[in-house]
Image (cartoon, rainbow, N blue to C red):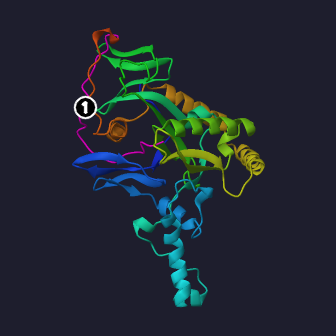
Amino acid sequence: MIKGLMITPPVIGRISIGKVVEKNGKRLPEKDDEFTITTQVQQRGQWVLHPLDEALRQSQAPGQVSSGIKEGTEPSDVQSETSASVTQTRTGKRSLKDKMGVADTPTAAPSTARRKLRSIPVRVLFNDPDLNLRADYCMFDRSTARPLCVGNGESCKRVTDKGLEELACPGPDTCRFGMGHCKPYGRLNVSIGDSDELGSFVFRTTGFNSIRTLAARLQYFAAVSSGHLACMPLELKLRGKSTTQSHRSAIYYADLVVRTGASLNEAIGQAYTLAAERLAAGFDQSALDGAARQGFANGNFEDAPDEGVEIVEEFYPEECETPTAPTTAAANEHWPPIAQASQRNGTHSPYP
């Protein structure tokens, strides 16, 4: 294994909340109130939707409120879905598929009338919660799209003029090196469906609400299932809330719950059954966790160089002003300039 190369879970797609849009000649992140599942391929500067994105939208019954989310739901969301069915009822016309007794496939609606994707059935890959969700305080350099400092509130790995050093990490609130540009950064890997049971979709976030909620849920589900976290039938769910910081407007964050239609006890029972089936087939979950743990420990920074531009746009949108370099007393750190990234691609969600 190449030393210094962190081995991370294979990623076959992305889950995001929000997108990057052009505003006044700048590419800025724009929040959204639904999930989007994409491939890792871009066309004309936009991420290509994954087939699962449309499949999950169509699997929701018309007019159904996804996983009970009503927080921040606009009346037009439901009205746009119900009005079409009302119109069809009034016309009284039957399609050829109706006459043949074949279920009609819903016609693709305009993007403004698409069903909101606010819940995704998922499983996690590992029994160890910390392997599924990695969260750090991170700071990136816009000029190189590479991480400068990654810490956990106690210690950090920081790029200085002396190379890579391990230093104390006071956290973003009091760190003079970060100066407001160090943020929490979380990566959650989940599997969707069973076409690739070791492949994952990555959800990236810099929101405290998402990181804190996901971390708590993973720990709790691991505890109540006696460590069978990877076998729990879960659902990535979008929640909304209003705060004083959001001026009472709705903000959205990610949560993990048991899959719709199952109680917690039923989900735990299913986890035990699946764990027994995997064990009988020779599936070694402990060895998988160990391999992942070894892979994460093999390198210093998790994100690959080719992912840097999207992450930089997530951490340093163009509306941010270039910070002033810290004083020499700030610990003799090398302070690289915060410049514009040389490329503009897509983004992962910068929202809670």
Q: Is residue 212 left or right of residue 16?
A: right
- Pointer 1 residue: 143
Please state the horizontal and vertical placement of residue 224, each as a whole percent of the image: 74, 38
Q: Secondary structure at mark 1?
A: loop
Residue 10 against residue 262 in the figure, above or below: above
In this view of the protein, which residue sits in the foreground, 31 or 295?
31
Q: Residue 348 colored magenta?
A: yes
Question: How far across and how far down the image is residue 241, in percent?
Answer: 54, 46
Residue 45 visible in the picture: yes
**Where residue 149 sits: x, y (%)?**
39, 23
Magenta-colored stretch includes residue 249: no
Residue 35 lies, in percent from the top left, at: 49, 53
Say which residue appears at 44% left-offset and 26% top-offset: 299
Q: Is residue 147 left or right of residue 123?
A: left
At label 1, the amino acid type is: Ser
Region rendered in magenta: 331-352
When asked about the image quadrant of residue 167, the answer is top left
Q: Is residue 310 left or right of residue 130?
A: left
